[in-house]
Image (cartoon, rainbow, N blue to C red):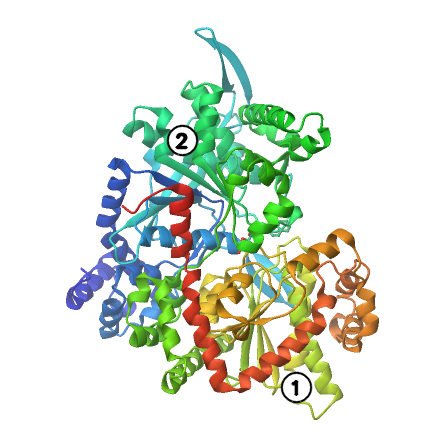
Amino acid sequence: MFSDKEQFKEVFLRKLEMTYGKSVEETSKRDQFHVLGMMVREYISKDWIKSAEKARTSKSKQVYYLSIEYLPGRFLGNNLLNLGITGLIKDGLNDLGIDLAEIEDHEADAGLGNGGLGRLAACFLDSLASLSLPGHGCGIRYKHGLFEQKFVDGFQVELPEQWLRHGFVWEVRKPDLAEEIPFWGTVESYSDGGRLKFRHIDAVKVLAVPYDVPVVGYQNKTVNTLRLWSAEPSPVPWQKDIMKYKRETEAVTEFLYPNDTHDEGKILRLKQQYFLVAATLKSIVGTFRKKYKDIHRFHEMVGLHINDTHPVLAIPELMRILIDEENLTWDEAWKITTQCISYTNHTTLSEALEKWPVRILAPLLPRIYMIIHEINERYCQELWQEYPGNWNHIEQMAIIAHGEIRMAHLAIAGSFSVNGVAKLHTEILKTREMQNFYKLYPDKFNNKTNGITHRRWLMKANPELSGLITEAIGDGWKKSPEELEMLNQFDNDEAFLRRLREVKRTKKHQLADRIHKNTGLKVNVDSIFDVQVKRLHAYKRQLLNVFHILYVYNRMKEDKQYKPYPRTFIFGAKASPGYYYAKKVIKLINSVAEKVNSDCEVNKYIQVIFLENYNVSLAEEIFPATEVSEQISTASKEASGTGNMKFMMNGALTIGTLDGANVEMEERLGRDNIFIFGLHADQVLNYLSNGGYSPYDYYHGDERIQLICNQLINGFFPNSSDQFEAIFDSLLTENDQFFVLRDFASYISTQRKVEAAYQDEKSWSKKSLKNIAMSGFFSSDRTVKEYADEIWKIQTI
Ligand code: 26V
């Protein structure tokens, strides 16, 4: 159906008619999207069945990636690319007067994640399939993904996201494979041939129904599966009040929690975590049981990877299955469990480390709690052997303490591998945040620097650049992204560098069109496109970026001769709904945009654009058009970052701190091809442990800083004069925890270097080329290979 254009057209038209009973002219773009999607899914299905069959029958180890979030965005374009049929379909549709891009625009963006962590999971799935590795995603089918963001008077307003409104063509509902998940109730003990056993009784049961989504590998016939579980009422009327029961069961998978907010104590979130883990393990153990006789070999054939601590209940749940259902002893079960589970840590921010109050977890999951309690007892005994009498130390490392269960401690104790997501992050885990654990289990700790799929973020998002690259070095880089390094030979090729600039200009024009469409604003494509897109968080320091803009604005107002090189500052960021400070920064960016954009003295030089509802699809339009990438987190706070890599791969130059993966970018690029500024991680950590930072010194010592801080509260923003006191206070009363004022001078002077460098067109293009050439390392293919070889020990099928 997709090897011959004429045949494709014929089938497409026929299906369109059959499905909607309308002629092509009468069908909507959405109808067309839907039919094309169905055809592609049908086309995938043969390879999908084959791949699933291999997974079922082959005697090779399978890995299951458990993640509470996936942020895949749209599937159509990506599937066409990986199937290698984009050209044929584009041409065929063209013949019919239909623009493929327009159809693609009608796919909803699957936003079942908050940011970096969920997008990483989606990149990993793409790499697993593209490397023909037996690795599958397990997640939750939220009815509503991350909220949709709107700005009203410059304030963020959240609307429920509706990605399923018109159906999701890629999924296959599998009601026959549904599992029952028990909550509440009590644990009963009984004797089984003299052996003390436990069972969970009087539980409220929720039905977990799997929806499978195909994950298409890059031109290799592999199609893996992302299994998303949805909660439904169980058909048996367990409850007296059936309506209440229906509401409560369906609520389990109704919403994705906005993660970077304090949600401890939210019982629904805990239900989601157990729901994912219990449904996934039931299904895996069931499959294993059909294939193998001996449960003792479970860990040899199955790897369970937990993406952060959200799925950490996989540890006690697997223990429960092995002990209660498979009749193993504690020691046997523990050996298998700890050899199955591997864990990735994604943050060192202490406020982000999950802890669950015993009073919440114990009644909801009584048997699971018993097991966690027992794990803690035995583990503390082990600690006692190691540190006899040192109660303090043991208390610090315990899994349960002060009425709380520390999920990271459970993850470390119950797994064989703990990894950080960039070199610096892993070092900070080993020497600071988790040093006690590192001392006890040095061999568990390892680093796996994050990566991004170059298929979506370069080949799909930037076909113009991909084409140029392929013309220059052939297309080996598509399967071996490290070959991008071959581009280095064009370092002095004027003609090539010119074409690189032309590609960037094309992408800037396209983004300018998008900006115009979304905001009504016209941007200057000759200006530097300077971009910061990521979740809004104090540590990411969007505020520092704003301070730079205000500095340029103030300088222009003060010195009418001063003309900065034209620059368009572009932002995209969602704030967690309950995060007061972040919402103030959103309002501030919008206020600055209003001030700058409406001032005809400055708006020829600088413009500020804040795009609403930043998501994967918008990101695909932003990265290729960017020239300056803002990666300005307080050093030590950003575990890795992955946006930084997407910008680099598309030829943007980074202005950034030595934080997260920026450090490894700098290692590969050399100092001349990246703009580094600010405190180093050890300096920040030193300040944080020993004090010695006084933001007032910088406020009083730097007139530029003083002016900007004062503008936050002195009526400079006339319509929001009382809005920014909280930001002012965070800097001066609350001691500027993220060192915005401390890094200000260094940031400003580095921005002047960026500006100067940009004006040397040829040298800038060389730097840009170098960024593309050295970005192959940051392909998630490299990352996933490292996981496969060093942690999971799985091989290509
Ligand atoms: C959660 C919370 C919750 C409480 C309030 C503060 C806060 C801040 C951040 C988070 C997110 C933690 C997990 C996470 O998403 N980490 C991100 O993972 C990415 C993929 O590894 C990585 O690139 C980002 O640097 C890291 O922030």
Q: Amino acid at mark 2?
A: Lys
Residue at 34% across, 53% down? 169
Look at the image and tell me in which quarter the N terminus lies: bottom left
Which of these two is toward me, 446 or 74? 446
Which numbered disc flags the more N-terminal residue, 2 or 1? Answer: 2
Residue at 49% across, 54% down? 449
Q: Which mark is residue 282?
A: 2
* Vertical side of 751 occupied by 431: above or below: above
Figure label count: 2
- Left or right? Give the position of 306 relative to 353: left
Measured in 3D between alpha carbons, the distance from the residue under mark 2 to the one under mark 1, in whole angstroms, is 62 Å
* Vertical side of 508 occupied by 324: above or below: above
Which of these two is toward me, 91 or 433? 433
Residue that sits furthest to the top in the current view: 194
Q: Which residue is mark 1?
A: 602
Residue that sits furthest to the bottom in the current view: 561
